[in-house]
Image (tube, rainbow, N blue to C red):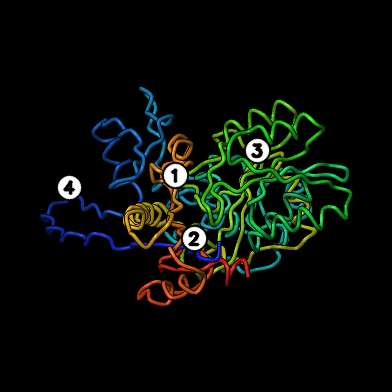
Amino acid sequence: MASSVALVLMKASLPRRQRMDRPRRSPAAVQLVAGVDAADDMFGSLAGCPPRPLEYPVVPDLDDYDVDDAPVAGRPAPASDKTLAVHAGEKLGSGAAAAETDSIATPVVGGTTHWFRDSADLIAFREGRRRSFEYGRYGNPTVKVLEEKISALERAEATLVTSSGMNAIVATLLALVPPGGHVVATADCYSEARAFIRDKLSNMGITSTFVDLDDDMEALESVLDEGEVTMFYADSMTNPHLKVVDVTRVAELCHRRGALVCIDSTLASPINQRPLALGADVVLHSATKYIAGHHDVIAGCVSGSEALVSRIRAWHHDLGGAISPNAAYMIIRGLKTLALRVQAQNRTALRMARLLEKHPKIERVYYPGLESSPWHGVATRQMAGAGGVVGLEVASDMRGAMRFVDALELPLIATSLGGCESLVQQPAIMSYW
């Protein structure tokens, strides 16, 4: 598709905060300063208001609760994504890095090694009776806060944060697919992951099959019936065609035959899609994208059950892909606005896709939020929004698409997504050069 263009869109304007009246000088006066965390949570709990139902596409706002998260009488309502993005791992969680300080912001713990009071203290740590850290490659208090925050958003038992998305992919595949194993992946999964599965894992005695799930599940069912499959691996959504995998259906088929399901959910973000809740065993992200959200840090993460993530963590220790505490802090800070950013990106991308779909010089638009998309039905069932990436084909050739890109005034020609700046790329001369 030489004339295709992938747009990464963001509209980050927020309403100006209204001026608060000065409180009366009464000892009983209370001043509430609204943040981006718990406004709906707080007023819902105070007034007993029921949660609003989820809508799709998200206009004008994503709602704070999942359908399954409705409050139960006598039990507080679960925290919203906005609140979890701000407080999980800190006020809501172990607060691993903030336990010894009253700082609102999680401190950056830069030390590479941690000391023990005596031998008994060390033994208690080894036996799991004392929570602490030993060496920076195995864990860090600041990184631990980030891992707990992502676990809360993904509704996962555990999360491992790594130095890059590719490091998370490699560690996951090496840990969960043994020699002699068989990986089934979608033909349009991330190109570097596809190359690693095809070229590198084959050197370790691991076979691979690539299937296309465009029409139905017959291709996957056929491979599963032919022999033992260790793992099904897919991106949902894919890049650049933004196909959506029916995770629930895939999980049913794979688990029936004993195969694990691993979903790279980078293009969706934890706000728009939770593969673990849909039946997947492991979910991956390039945290560089939506999770960090500012084009200034590289990281990856993998979430799942404690048992699976522990196996991945052991391989990660050997691979040495530890993220620095400073990078972890930057992602923690970026996560505070994740829900707000993704909601804005959902709205802007949907408006842009609808505009482009009607333009006479655009042949085709790829965006699952459009009713014309073949993926709209499954996206509506399993996603809260369709994300901030829009793919399109210009009614021209490769050079015509280049003229279109060069004529844009605001988007920067760059490869990535999920940040605050709008980006544009032409895959034929960038990611698929």
- What residue lies at 67% left-to-right and 38% top-to-bottom? 261
**Amino acid residing under circle 4:** Ala
> What is the x, y in percent for residue 204?
88, 52
> What is the x, y in percent for residue 162?
65, 59
Whether residue 291 is visible, yes or no, is yes
Q: Earlier in the sequence, mark 3 or mark 1?
A: 3
Nearer to us of marks 4 and 1 is 1
* C-alpha span from label 4 to label 2: 31 Å
Could you tell whether 282 is left or right of 47 in the image? right
Q: Which structural element holds mark 1?
A: loop
> What residue would you read off at disc 4?
28
**Amino acid residing under circle 3:** Asp
**What is the number of the mark on residue 373?**
1
> What residue would you read off at disc 2?
106
> What residue would you read off at disc 3?
281
Q: Earlier in the sequence, mark 4 or mark 1?
A: 4
**Amino acid residing under circle 2:** Thr
The reply to whether the C-beta atoms of the residues labelled 2 and 1 are less than 8 Å apart is no
Nearer to us of marks 2 and 1 is 1
Q: Nearer the viewer, residue 188 or 107?
A: 188
Q: Nearer the viewer, residue 139 or 287?
A: 287
Q: Earlier in the sequence, mark 4 or mark 3?
A: 4
Q: Is residue 380 above or below residue 204?
A: above
> What is the x, y in percent for residue 124?
74, 46
